[in-house]
């Protein structure tokens, strides 16, 4: 049980002072009964809290799926460029949301935003190896040698040997790339190593999450309970591919 003013202010929509006024004005109900004071205790998950009749979702953490458009940086703030947070309404910019993983400024598609630091950390930890799938279009044409090279592991210009990755050709210059690791500009550098610069890159999946086709670029929605649970479980297909742990390659056979 937590204080009502704490629960309501954590949504980012009202300050504690504003909650006090709302309660005084009789605009807040808890399980259908007008709240008596801002200090009153309520159950964040179990109580039905309403303000002016509107049911308030006050779960401790927020999880958003965004269809990131080109031109925004995946950060909470940036001295020069607009960030993905600029697409959110004011109250969602005040609750500590951050992108779990980054997409380049010109990359579009699925971006997860949350303020659940523990879950984000788990999803991004190399040991957990959350697979990601991207649609890529290159300047040039893909061929079977590219598929083999991706499967065997591309060596980047700086000498880094990538883990084996999936390359499924969907057109002469288009493919689905599945990554089992996430290095800086990874797909761009992998394609560059094959002499095929990336012309377009879109993330379609992030672990068990798939980009919602109803989200236009720049749109976002809250994750469903099932989606959040699947992230917690981090359900993955049992891919027998090597993962990197503390610099060593091991096979994931769980
Ligand atoms: N690989 C890239 O090169 N860029 C991204 O944004 C994601 C993966």
Image (cartoon, rainbow, N blue to C red):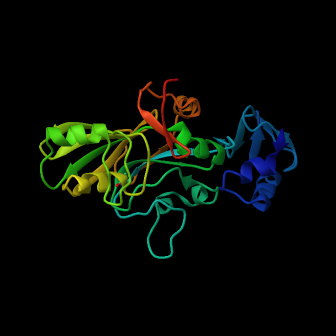
Q: Nearer the viewer, residue 89 or 132?
A: 132
- Residue toward you, 68 or 5: 68
Q: Residue furthest bottom?
A: 80
> Is 86 left, or right, of 93 in this rendering?
left
Relative to 164, does residue 236 appear above or below in the rendering? above
List x then y, in percent, for residue 146: 20, 43
Could you tell me which residue is drawn at 22 percent across and 37 percent down?
Answer: 148
Rendered residue at 51%/28% (across/down): 235
Residue at (47% x, 28% y) in the render: 236
Residue 228 position by quadrant: top right
> Is residue 26 in sight in this rendering?
no
- In the picture, the quarter occupied by the N terminus is top right
Spot occupied by residue 101 in the image (x, y as percentages of width and height): 49, 51
Q: Is residue 2 above or below residue 48?
A: below
193 relative position to 105: left or right: left
Q: Position of residue 217 (x, y in %)?
A: 34, 52
């Amino acid at each position: 049980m937590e204080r009502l003013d704490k629960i309501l202010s954590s949504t980012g929509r009202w300050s504690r002072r504003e909650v006090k006024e709302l309660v005084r004005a009789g605009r807040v109900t808890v399980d259908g009964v007008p709240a008596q004071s801002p200090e009153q205790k309520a159950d964040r998950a179990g109580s039905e809290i309403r303000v002016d009749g509107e049911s308030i979702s006050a779960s401790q953490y927020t999880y958003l799926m965004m269809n990131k458009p080109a031109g925004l940086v995946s950060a909470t703030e940036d001295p020069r460029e607009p960030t993905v947070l600029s697409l959110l309404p004011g109250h969602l910019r005040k609750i500590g949301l951050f992108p779990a993983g980054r997409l380049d400024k010109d990359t579009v598609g699925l971006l997860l935003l949350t303020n659940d630091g523990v879950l984000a950390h788990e999803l991004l930890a190399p040991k957990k190896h959350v697979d990601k799938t991207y649609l890529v279009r290159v300047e040039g044409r893909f061929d079977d040698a590219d598929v083999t090279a991706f499967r065997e592991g591309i060596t980047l210009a700086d000498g880094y040997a990538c883990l084996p990755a999936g390359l499924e050709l969907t057109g002469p210059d288009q493919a689905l790339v599945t990554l089992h690791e996430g290095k800086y500009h990874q797909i761009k550098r992998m394609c560059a190593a094959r002499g095929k610069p990336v012309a377009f890159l879109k993330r379609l999946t992030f672990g068990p999450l798939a980009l919602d086709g109803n989200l236009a670029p720049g749109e976002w929605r809250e994750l469903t309970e099932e989606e959040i649970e699947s992230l917690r479980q981090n359900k993955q297909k049992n891919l027998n591919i090597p993962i990197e742990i503390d610099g060593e390659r091991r096979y994931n056979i769980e």
